[in-house]
Image (cartoon, coloured by chain):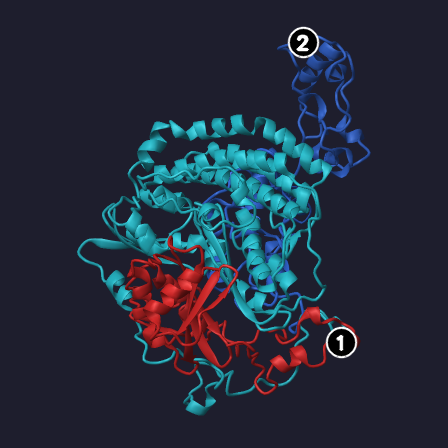
Chain colours: A red, B cyan, C blue
Amino acid sequence: MDRTLRRRLEARLSAQLQGPIRQRHDQTEIRIRPGDVPDVLRTVHDAVDLRFEILADLAGVDTGDVMQVVYHLWSETSPDWLRVIADGIARDDPRCPSATFLWTGAEWLEREAYDMFGIIFEGNRDLRRIFMPPDYTSFPLRKDFLLPDDAARSPGEGVRHIERPVAAARAAADPATGVRRARVS
Amino acid sequence: MPSRTARPNTGAGARPQGPPAPAQHRSEDDPRVMLERDINADMYEPIPPYPTQTERESEFYSSGDGEMFINIGPHHPATHGVLRLVLKLSGEQIVDVDPVLGYLHRGVEKICENSDYYHVIDQVDPLEYISSLFQEWAAVLAFEKLMDVEVPRRAEYIRVLSGELLRIASHTLYMGFLALDLGGLTPILYSFIERDEIMEMLASLTGARMLFNYFRIGGVNGDLNHEFMSRLGDWMSRAAKQTEANAGLLNENEIFVRRTRGVGVLDRATALRFGVTGGNLRAAGVPFDLRRAHPYSVYPELDFNIPTRDEGDSLARYLIRVDEVRESIRIIDQCLHNMPDGPVMAKLPRLLRPRPGRAWGACEGPRGMMGVYAVSDGSDQPFRFRIHDPSFMHLETVPTLLPGNLLADTMTIVASLDPVLGGIDK
Amino acid sequence: MPASIGAGSQGSAGAPVPDASKSQLAAPVPGEITAPIVVPNTLWRAANPLAYDGGRPAEVTHLREFGLTDVGRRDDARWGALQVVPARADEVLDLIRTNSLWPLLSGLACCAFEMMSGATSKNDMDRWGMFPFRASPRQADVLIVAGTLTTKMAGPLLRLWEQMPEPKWCVALGDCTVSGGRYKRSYSTVQGIDRVMPVDVYIPGCPPRPEGLIYGMLQLGQLVKDRRGHWAEREIGPTVPDKI
């Protein structure tokens, strides 16, 4: 847990942060709006005391309500991983600015996020499907795409009636659409 | 699976009777016009506006004068897996390349979202099937951060020991495959002898030759046993000499050196821009190794070097792996001497329900940084399980490295980057 | 003519020449040569006078009878002083095919590495003639599908199968090809390759040991000898019910 990193980030990015900077174990997490992604990534990449030059991962997350794009970055200046969550992408028309202006390697990662979730990255020169065949029409990792098996049941719940928890896991699944909504944003 | 009622097995052809729904099962020759209401409303369509051909695609598929397209298809004898490369050639020189992935996409992330935490570790094995302990390690690191679990020291040492053994096996295999792709059919046999020995060792430790399912949240599945120690002792007594012999097959082979020196130079800035990690990044001059940069497990207590080279060509990538094998042997030696006593598994409840939260865990695999981002929503299944594979980023550098080289260098460059299609395609 | 030849052998061995018409096993066909054509051995003499049956002429002298006896079906069957094994041509062809089944390099995923382990020095498939893994389907006999088959790859794999010339066999290696395996719930894998192509031998395991693969290939050899791989009669299609 790097306290100095938190102070440096608050100094540089106070305008764009949506909520407090959370730190746990060796990870520092900031939340921003999707529109601020280019500015924040540029700041975090170029600033002399931040210099997060290594892009570790770019992932899409579907919380059931909104979608997120999560970036993981690494710098020599800090022993912590930096996690940037671009939160609040609407599920009906998911758009996010592309990070390919900074890291060319983000191109395929964004293609994967598009293929799995349908998030359109504006600025990506090559946004087509990467894993599924090009004429596939669904986005598999969305929460309303259910596997042929009943996705809401877990074998860990136990076979006998007495082992099934009453409220916890069932409440997580919305009975109307079967979409599992996260209890954390 | 629970609550499945018994059905008589009526064998093949037991189809439900009745006519199919007419709207969905009309043939193309049906003269009736397909109305908007007949189209299945559950189909997802690409969200408009979306161009039918992206910028890069139109740039690639517009061929100039004398340029032709050659397809190195998903099935080809350079067995890195099912990868398709569409090359645009002008004579023998490569102008552009478009890799097509997805021929091994198995939907592991989605399956993991519907499995409990124990099963995720088993599901994550076949990603980089050659070195499957490292995916387990990354997943277990992420889960241990989610659940705040302390791992006993003996378990950490066993993890490092088995991981470094597997790293040696993977690097030996890399050397063999690099030679095989260049046409040398002998080193692969030597590599497989080494690898078979290590696999039998790990089989006596974990129970399986390849997809081990050995790491657990909070430790490892079983302690060291007598058979594993005796096999390991036998192997260690000749490991160093064997490594030198295997490497000596290729290090001074003139054909090999001339075909790999200066081919596919990946310089430092390009490597950082592409998110390349592991041996390929260290061959480009960046001494970034997660075992030293962001130490996990008991690596801070172990003494080893990080080999780095500056040239960035295929030969440098090969030589780095040879050096890493030597360093791994040193690490195994230290592990054996410093192995502490104690339990090999932390005490955990049978039903794992972490608090809602997010965690990222990354380990240094033989190819690079293997990362896992896990999101928990309080239930016994991970809400989002994202795997970051290093070979994915390496393959992304291929359209930059390949143009300008000859057709024969395709396999040199692709093989020297060491892609494993299982991890790339998830 | 026959008398002089027979006299020659009689001179060297001193035993009477049997008469084919006296054989109990088969009736003579009109127009057929009824006396055996015996070529005496005048070129060399064995060191041991009892070798090669002491020069005794054979009891069975016609191929017709030979095929009817069970002596003729043994691997070490002999026919007279010429020391040959008569067999029907198709049995010989089956033996030839069994002992040189050339696989097509079709490694898709993890099982490919166990296949390669089976082909390299420690578990050597070359002992049974299976070492050359051909890269081209035109030259291969067996398609060992090793690794998960996805819906995207199913098309190319089927094209490979169709390009292989007959006689050809298919071996499903690993759980993913047998039934979908650990990817039974996946949205993009084919649940067992017998949904798209006919399979002769299923080898379960995740991944199966190379010894398992070798056992499967030997079973395939047995299959070739027994049924000659009646490939036209193999059915494509799932042998499992629709609803799983």
Q: Amino acid at mark 2?
A: Arg
Tell me what residue is drawn at x 40 percent, y 50 percent: B277
> Residue C45's mark?
2
Q: Position of residue A143 (x, y in %)?
A: 52, 76
Most distant residue in the left direction:
B65
A65 with respect to B393 (left or right): right
Look at the numbered disc 2 and give the secondary structure of its residue: loop
Residue C96 sits above or below residue B370 on the image: above
Q: What quarter of the picture does the N terminus of chain B occupy?
A: bottom right
> Residue C53's mark?
none
Label 2–label 1 contact, CB within 8 A: no
Q: Badge 1, how many Cα within 10 Å: few under 14, some, many 20+?
A: few
Residue marked by disc 1 = B5
Q: Position of residue C210 (x, y in %)?
A: 63, 42
Q: How many marks?
A: 2
Query: Closest to the observer: C183 or A113?
Result: A113
Tell me what residue is drawn at x 19 percent, y 58 percent: B64
Q: Position of residue A171 (x, y in %)?
A: 64, 82
Look at the numbered disc 1 and give the secondary structure of its residue: loop
Q: Position of residue B374 (x, y in %)?
A: 53, 65
Q: Amino acid at mark 1?
A: Thr
Read off the chain for label 1: B
Front label number (2 vs 1):
1
User: Mark 2 vs mark 1: same chain?
Assistant: no
- Residue C16 appears anywhere in the view: yes
Residue B337 sits above or below residue C149 on the image: above
Residue B362 sits above or below residue A128 on the image: above
